[in-house]
Image (cartoon, grey):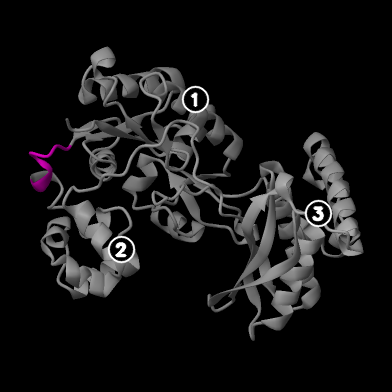
Amino acid sequence: MDRIILHSDLNNFYASVECLYNPAIRNKPVAVAGDIEKRHGIILAKNYIAKAYGVKTGDALWQARDKCPDIVFVPPSYDKYLNYSKMAREIYSNYTNQVESFGLDECWLDISNSTQLFGDGERVSNEIRQRIKDELGVTASVGVSYNKIFAKLGSDMKKPDATTIITKDNFKEKVWVLPANDLLYVGRATFSKLRKLNVHTIGDLAATNSKLLKQELGINGIMLWQFANGLDQSKVSEINSYPAIKSIGNSTTLPYDVSSEEDVRITLYILCESVAERLRDSGFIANTVQIWLRDKNLFSCERQGKLLFPTCGSNELFEKAFSIYKANKPHFALRSIGVRACNLSVSSKRQLSCLDEFEIMVKKEKLEIAVDDIRRRFGHFSIQRASMLVNPVLSNLDPKTDHVIHPVSFLK
């Protein structure tokens, strides 16, 4: 029996939620955007009115303004989006326990074992769309198919508030005519390589020799060939089932290009505090620290180093990150900086040590747990390092709260 997979995509999610909270802007072109003064000034989401003017996600604010002079910019409110995402998942869970998130606004549902209770895929999709509209005040597009890849394609094919069905009998007519870059994981670079092979549509990709694709794209070439031919067999995870966390990181675009070690020191401390707090929240310790640097010419590099002891303390993360930076200092001023804790292990299973350095590290971690509690109660800026006061422009960043949430990878 074929599986019945749904993919629900909340339409223009961020912008829809903002319009719901502010009726005065509902009939205007609206875009959720970053802070231009902090050089985060890009479009994160837009409503259909703004889209009709050609405004795109990723546009700079000035580009969006050129296309649509009357556009209304609103800052992102991630707490609201998280709440609405949770409420949508609660609706999905009424129909199946197999609900897999793909970012805040998208979910796959496997209702193969629920059809006798709720009806076929089309009926369930229409019911879910109506409930989302009635209970949440936003709309959703739903794709129905026998695998996850085609279900996601279906939800993208007709918007807003629509159901699209792709079956084994009609996928060649519906899917193969679409551009190859409509397929999941065919990004700009991959699509460029495919065009050199005269592959322009999903049908072209399906008809291409899989060995040639592997030669040009590696193992991903085989995966994309399977996707195009409807051979995806990946399962939908059960609700609240998450893949193992492999790393925890944070990055920021700086308010101005920095080249001094003191400016880099402040930024790295802020990011390391955020990463360390996330580690403690998740019950992990890190064995490796990785830094990511992007200079003013948009050239990026990553470097990493191993810690003496596994830790969830910001001081140890910072010392390692800063030493890596000094050993790999770029020639040009930096535009963006990131820190990632890698090679994680469970903190409750940490091997103890009799060395004095280990005892000192554990005491510092306990101090930081107390700082976490103060910030939870009174806000991030209620307690700061003295070094943060040297440069209020750089230190005016709460990276744990003020961050964009990206989709969870389809690949496990």
165 above or below 90?
A: below
How many numbered callouts? 3
Could you tell whether 123 is left or right of 268 in the image? left
Mark 1 vs mark 3, foreground winner is 3
**Cα gap from disc 1 to disc 3, whole angstroms:** 42 Å
Q: Amino acid at mark 2?
A: Asn
**Cα gap from disc 1 to disc 2, whole angstroms:** 35 Å
Q: Tag on residue 220?
A: 2
Residue marked by disc 3: 352
Could you tell whether 246 is left or right of 67 in the image? right
Mark before the other along the chain sequence, 1 or 2: 1
Residue marked by disc 1: 87
Q: Tag on residue 268?
A: none
Residue 294: horizontal and vertical position, in percent? Answer: 58, 73
Residue at image position (18%, 70%) is 211
Q: Where are the magenta residues, as a range? A: 166-172
Could you tell whether 153 is left or right of 308 in the image? left
Mark before the other along the chain sequence, 1 or 3: 1
Q: Secondary structure at mark 1?
A: helix
